[in-house]
Image: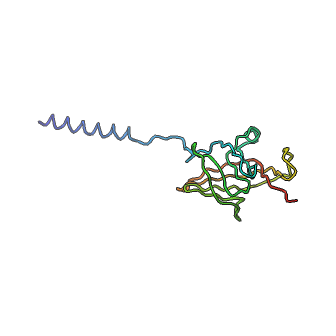
Amino acid sequence: MKTISSLILVSLISASSLFSQTSAPRLLPPRAPFVLDTVAPMAPPGGHSNYLVSLTEDDFKHDRFVFYTDSNATMAFLRINGNDLVLTGGPNPEHIMAYTSKYFTATLSVSKSTPVVNTGLSDDKKVMKIEGRLCVYNSKGQMVAKDVTGHLITLVKK
């Protein structure tokens, strides 16, 4: 009887130590809380987007945008984890823009702008090349922040 009790006790101790080794947390590389994907601008009623923003110059040259706005900059469009989002908002004092949807907030802050760029648009439009930072926050406060480059297109009042 003592032998059986000892054998059961040793088995339980072995099993618990084996379980604690296999259930130890594994170190995984940190993952972004969400991913910004490229989004293709639709033609808004005004015929152009106000802001067109890409992650790199090369992306911008090949029309791979992560953020764009409608012609009045009242709505922003981006794609997060493969889902197209429409955010509403507009200019605010801290950032060029702050947009919100049910689960996300996006801010675009411009750090540099350069003089007017000739893009072949009609004479009633002016285009500024911009560089800045796009920050997207989800409902849990997690953030993805990316340096961006792109254009600001404004109508020239004659």
Compare residues 35 and 38 and report the one nearer the observer.
38
Measured as percent of width and height from the top left, residue 11 is found at 24, 36
Instruction: Looking at this view, name the residue that lies furthest to the left.
Output: 1
Compare residues 145 and 13 and report the one nearer the observer.
145
Decide if residue 42 is on the left or right side of residue 33: right
Residue at (76, 55) in percent of width and height? 111
Quadrant of the rendered image containing residue 13: top left
Quadrant housing the N terminus: top left
Residue at (85, 48) in percent of width and height? 122
Count of numbered badges drawn on the protein: 0
The colour scheme is rainbow
Quadrant of the rendered image containing residue 88: bottom right
Compare residues 99 and 36 and report the one nearer the observer.
99
Compare residues 47 and 127 and report the one nearer the observer.
47
Measured as percent of width and height from the top left, residue 121 is found at 84, 46
Decide if residue 37 is on the left or right side of residue 13: right
Instruction: Looking at this view, name the residue that lies furthest to the bottom.
Output: 93
Decide if residue 34 is on the left or right side of residue 54: left
Residue at (76, 49) in percent of width and height? 47
Quadrant housing the C terminus: bottom right
Eyeballing the image, is 67 above or below 5? below
Eyeballing the image, is 94 above or below 148? below
Instruction: Looking at this view, name the residue that lies furthest to the front.
Output: 45
Residue at (75, 42) in percent of width and height? 60
Measured as percent of width and height from the top left, residue 102 is found at 55, 56
